[in-house]
Amino acid sequence: MGVLFIIAFRNLVQARRRTALLSGAIGLVTLLLVLLLSLSQGIADNLVKSATTLSAGHVVVAGFYKPSPSQALPLVTDAAKVRKVIEDSTPGLDYIVSRGRGWGKFVGPGGTVQAGYTGVTLAGEPHFLETLQLAFQDEYVDGGKHEVLGDATRIAEPGAVIIFANQARRMEVEVGDDLTFVTETSDGRTNTIDLRVVAVARDLGMLSSFSVLGEAETLRKVYKLNEDTAGAFWIYLKDIDQAEAVMGTLRVALAQAGFQLMDHDPNPFFFKFEGVAGEDWTGQKLDVTIWRDEVSFLVRILDVFNLVSVFIAAVLLVIVAIGIINTMFNIVRERTREIGTMRAIGIHRSRVLVLFLIEASMLGLFATVMGATVGAGLSMAIDAAGFPAPIDAMKAILLSDTIHMSVRFATLAQVIFVLTSCTGLAALWPAARGARLRPIVALGYTS
Amino acid sequence: MPGIVELTNVVKDYPLGKLSVRALHDINITIGEGEFTAIAGPSGSGKTTILNMIGCMDVPTQGTVSIAGTITNNLGDRALTDLRLNRIGFIFQTFNLINVLDVYQNVEFPLLLQGKLSGAERKARVNAMVEKVGLTKQIGQRPNELSGGQRQRVAIARALVTNPAIVLADEPTANLDSKTGHAIIDLMSDLNRNDKITFIFSTHDPKVMECATRLVKVEDGRVVG
């Protein structure tokens, strides 16, 4: 078999120009695919980061409390007991965060923002300050200074809120300014409270348009909630990939502890209000989801992006595959006499087939490794350069103000494997044609 | 005593459009072990077709071909390939070496396909064979670095390295100048005399025919002498 590798390799080297052109085409498709997948991974990273900072933990235990059949409040009652079950039953638990949930209007001097009020208890959130990056003043104030103002740790103060740069621009507020929060309470009345902006955070994509982070006790007062309630428990795991399995485990544990559970619905909690309000029951039902469910509308954008990427790569791959098939037919034709000689000497058809498949796969491997290496380097360079997204629509898709690209070794290995296999497969037809040649025909003794 | 090659009432037809052309008419040839046989005749007389039958690269339309006791008519491609690999050596008019392999690798190739010998045994066998054809100094060179005569010597070494029962040579001197051609025939003749290897070669060169211990004359697809 080793000699087949030698023949394949030396034939590729001998036909330098053809090898270079074909490698270039395969390498370019690989490069493009790596760039698209790196961008997709970058968006996915942004999505996970923003989702697990603003919307969810890796697993979320939330729920609805219905004081009457027509009302639904995003509340977890008997919160201490729920938390105890989570602590006792979650494998691979890192930490739990209790977040308050509210929804209303934030009114500033320049405008209004409709957003969720997320109640934060700083003492119970070990990584809150690490995940939140504060914005420079010039990111939300025209002519502002290129320096960070405010202090995120002040979110522990009563009435304190951290807003995002896009909200600061829309409401024309900055650090130290006051806002008014207007919301409807469980008894149907409108309640308002003044809040103070203690910091302005850098945007985390689309989600940061709909979320304001505030002190948890203030939220409790606005909604007149007692101590043993929570908006949601955000559960952070040591391995985010275990989220789905942990969700299943927790559903069983909570049911065994006597809690009523909603059927799993892979959508964010605010999508469920209407449906739950229309259901004919009262009391508490818990809702267990994972982070992906809470940002399912954004995951769909990512899915579409991935689909488009794969489609583009597939079209290019088909074009290249046609080129490979055509080239391999030429190679087989050029080397018909060599095939005839080898068949006369005593090589089996299967080995002739393998010879040409090795040749095509070798070419594919070389080209895809080169393409993937250049693509990975380019992705890392673009990521390091931190190019700003040129238009707002792109920011919404990227979930970031800058183009973030993330290269994973496993992705590169998959791309190399898949494209090399495709190259090998594309050679199958011409290789089979070569292998089927009778030695007497291949040697030109008869047609 | 049965011959190592026996062609009995062999007929070969080739399709030509809707017609059929008869290339061989009722051929009967028996060649004994250790013979140095020339199949002679003008171009288109059927020499190569006979060699193809003996070389298991083609099967007769009628009649039987027996190689070293095996009747080839009903063998499939795999069995015919194995028969070629293990019992027959080929020397071609245009040398037909594998251009990307050097002399050593070209000679070693059939042994690798057989897979019977260890690396050390293969090396010893190949080196001995290359020495026998006088190409030890050129062992690392590729075919395009060799003269025509040297290439044909490589082809001879490759044909002999598996110790075949028969070596077939299709016009082995046709692409060589007369001096080199004679040197090649002398080499084959020496190998036949010293190692008792059965050689069957086609030629239309009268000087080459003189070297054969047996001559089979063919004309218009028939044996005429």
Image: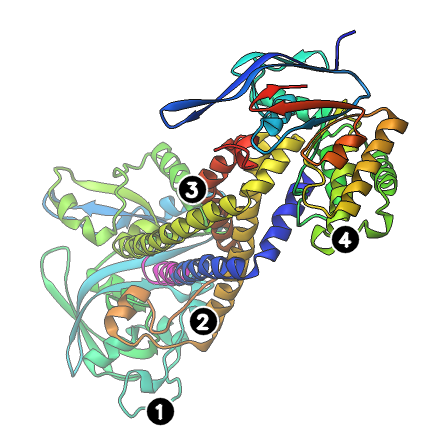
Magenta-drawn stretch, dominant element (helix, strand or loop): helix
Label located before the other in sequence (3 or 2)? 3
**Chain letter of disc 1 in the image:** A
Q: Is residue A303 left or right of residue B169?
A: left
**Chain letter of disc 2 in the image:** A
Label located before the other in sequence (1 or 2)? 1
Q: Between label 3 and label 4, give the one nearer the viewer.
A: 4
Q: Residue at x 46, y 57 (%)?
A: A26
C-alpha distance separating marks 3 and 1 = 46 Å
- Location of residue A374 with respect to B37 vertically, above or below: below
C-alpha distance separating marks 2 and 4 = 51 Å
Q: Check disc 1 and report the residue beneath it.
A: A145
Badge 3 density bin: few <14, some 14–19, many ≥20, Cα 10 Å: many
C-alpha distance separating marks 3 and 2 = 33 Å
- Of residue A102 and residue B104, the one placed in the foreground of this image is B104
Q: Amino acid at mark 1?
A: Lys
Q: Check disc 4 and report the residue beneath it.
A: B141
Label located before the other in sequence (3 or 1)? 1
Q: Check disc 3 and report the residue beneath it.
A: A246
Q: Are marks 1 and 2 on the same chain?
A: yes
Task: Say what secondary structure mark 2 lies in.
Answer: helix
Could you say where residue A365 lies in the image, as x and y percent from the top left?
55, 52
- Of residue B61 and residue A227, the one placed in the foreground of this image is B61
Residue A418 visible in the picture: no
Q: In which quadrant of the rendered view does residue A147 lie? A: bottom left
Q: Amino acid at mark 4?
A: Gln
Q: Amino acid at mark 3?
A: Val
Q: Amino acid at mark 2?
A: Asp
- Of residue A440 and residue A104, the one placed in the foreground of this image is A440
Q: Check disc 2 and report the residue beneath it.
A: A383
- Location of residue B94 with respect to B167 vertically, above or below: below
